Amino acid sequence: MNSSSAVVLFLFFLFSANPFSLSATAANEPVLDTDGEELRSGAPYYIQSTIPGAGGLELAPLYTSGGWCPKIVAQSKSTNGLAVFFNPVDSTDATVHLSTDVNIRFTGFDPYCRSSNTWRVAPYSTLPGHWWIANGGEIDNPGPQTLLTRFKIEKVKVGYKLTFCPTVCESCVTLCNDIGKYNYQNQVLLGLTKGDAWPFVFVKAFKAIEQVVEKHSE
């Protein structure tokens, strides 16, 4: 199956479930970092587990029949992982709000895969069994591919969760999925799941670096 067919099949799967309605109250509530300050578009953050010391996120190579690309978003073996940027899709507001579409991207560019580090839902054929969260997202060319880069942040009991539930239009129907973790090939990888989201917090990147420097200077 070529990539275009895979996208069409995915979108059929995506828009064939229950009606989705966006809560205006939730959408107006800002996402907060660990300092209690609003998440800002264009500022770097680490997405870290709510479990202290469990690490952040990074990109991990995973061999498939198509080679080593794309890379999959995975739990980092280091403390902080890679910093990310959040960019609201349909708003010029610099504040990131709950329940609204955002693009998420790691810093830098992937020279090996020659692709962006923008997150996307990879085609199911990338690895049988899961819809992985991978790099290589397209955000500058409107079309089916850009829908795969729309994620949301939702509040949970402790911290936040990430979801894939694109807001396309009020009358559209959509299949919404949480983003959870899977143990595969000695790695912890992120993929779509139903009802088993991985809770996160958001830490300012510069603050996390300062804390590491202070710890080593003691």
Image: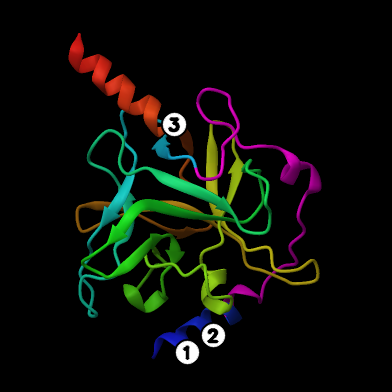
Q: Where is residue 97 in the image (x, y as percent from the top left)?
A: 66, 43
Q: Residues within 10 Å of mark 2 (few under 14, many from 20)?
A: few
Marking on residue 8: 2
Which residue has dot 3 on it?
A: 203
Q: Which of marks 3 and 2 is nearer the N terminus?
A: 2
**43 relative position to 80: left or right:** right
Alpha carbon of mark 1 to alpha carbon of mark 2: how far?
Answer: 5 Å
Residue 20 rendering spot, x and y as whole percentages: 73, 62
Q: Is the residue 156 above or below the residue 186 in the image? A: above
Amino acid carrying mark 2 in the image: Val
Badge 3 marks a residue whose secondary structure is: strand
Q: Comparing marks 3 and 2, which lies closer to the viewer?
A: 3
Confirm whether the magenta stretch covers residue 41.
Answer: yes
**Residue for badge 1:** 5
Q: Quadrant of residue 47?
A: top left
Relative height, residue 99 to residue 31 (above, below): below
Q: Mark 3 belongs to which amino acid?
A: Val
Q: How many labels does the image show?
A: 3
Spatial CA distance of label 3 from label 2 is 36 Å
Q: What stretch is highlighted in magenta?
A: 13-42
Question: What residue do we see at 52% from left, 70% from top?
Answer: 140
Circle 1/circle 2 CB separation < 8 Å: yes
Helix, strand or loop at mark 2: helix
Closest to the observer, 165 or 217: 217
Which image quadrant for residue 185?
bottom left
Quarter of the view holding residue 125: bottom left
Q: Which residue is drawn at 32% across and 20% down?
A: 211
Assess whether residue 57 is covered by the magenta stretch. no
The spot of residue 51 in percent (x, y) is 39, 30
Q: Which residue is drawn at the image coordinates 42% and 46% (left, top)?
A: 84
Q: What residue type is labelled 1?
A: Ser
